[in-house]
Amino acid sequence: AFFTPYIGHGDSVRIVDAELGTLEREHIHSTTTRRRGLTRRESSSDATDSDPLVITTDKGKIRGTTLEAPSGKKVDAWMGIPYAQPPLGPLRFRHPRPAERWTGVLNATKPPNSCVQIVDTVFGDFPGATMWNPNTPLSEDCLYINVVVPRPRPKNAAVMLWIFGGSFYSGTATLDVYDHRTLASEENVIVVSLQYRVAS
């Protein structure tokens, strides 16, 4: 199916961290495409190799942040990591192209955009309906993954890949009901989630 979520066709995702170790997933796929340039999220900060929230991927360095779960437990999170070029303009209906490398340190401290979709207004502000509406800006530039890790960082932890449902009609990985902080801190797993194109 054209809109089955991939992460960079035939590409690999490699996250290297001194404490966490090396995570590798080969031949991860994605149905979307990527964008040229990362100026919106890029940072030329003075990060050093000793900063535990700055890690190196095969595309460049990314800076994460520490979050607190409702239970009070802490997690480290890297949000909005590009896995493909954004499907903009001539790339809108094309197969995915691997994300380009970047220079400097990519700011991965905020939740990514949600992919363009129809927002449910049938039930007004009824919480049982609005809780499923996107909680981040809608944009075609939305092909990102999020990684949330317990603190202290576990050794040889399981990796949980969360792909939200919605019948390819609507949905987003950033919903409060999919609280990555709780999943990671309570189950002691590394939580990975991704955005993918819907409503097309």
Image: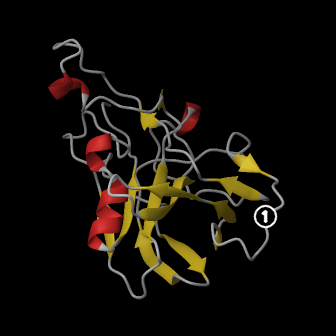
What x and y, as percent, mark residue 74? 45, 63
Numbered label tally: 1
- Disc 1: CA contacts within 10 A as few (<14), some (14-19) or many (>=20): some
127 to 124, vertically: above or below: below
| Quadrant that contains the C terminus | top left
The reply, left or right, for residue 172 in relation to residue 45 is left
Q: Which residue is drawn at 49% across and 50% down?
A: 144
Q: Which residue is drawn at 65% across and 61% down?
A: 62
The reply, left or right, for residue 186 in relation to residue 42 is left
What x and y, as percent, mark residue 148? 44, 63
Residue 83 appears anywhere in the view: no
Q: Residue at x 17, y 13 (%)?
A: 122
Most extreme residue toward the front is 72
Colour scheme:
secondary structure
Q: Which residue is drawn at 30% across and 31% down?
A: 199
* Residue nearest the viewer, comparing 198 with 45: 45
Q: Which amino acid does label 1 sit on?
A: Ala
Q: Mark 1 points at which residue?
A: 47
What x and y, as percent, mark residue 153? 47, 78
* Residue nearest the viewer, comparing 9 with 150: 150
Check disc 1 and report its element: helix, strand or loop. loop
* Residue nearest the viewer, comparing 47 with 96: 47
Q: Residue 68, located in which quarter of the rendered image?
A: bottom left
Residue 73 appears anywhere in the view: yes
What x and y, as percent, mark residue 21? 53, 85
* Residue nearest the viewer, comparing 57 with 135: 135
The reply, left or right, for residue 8 in relation to residue 69 is right
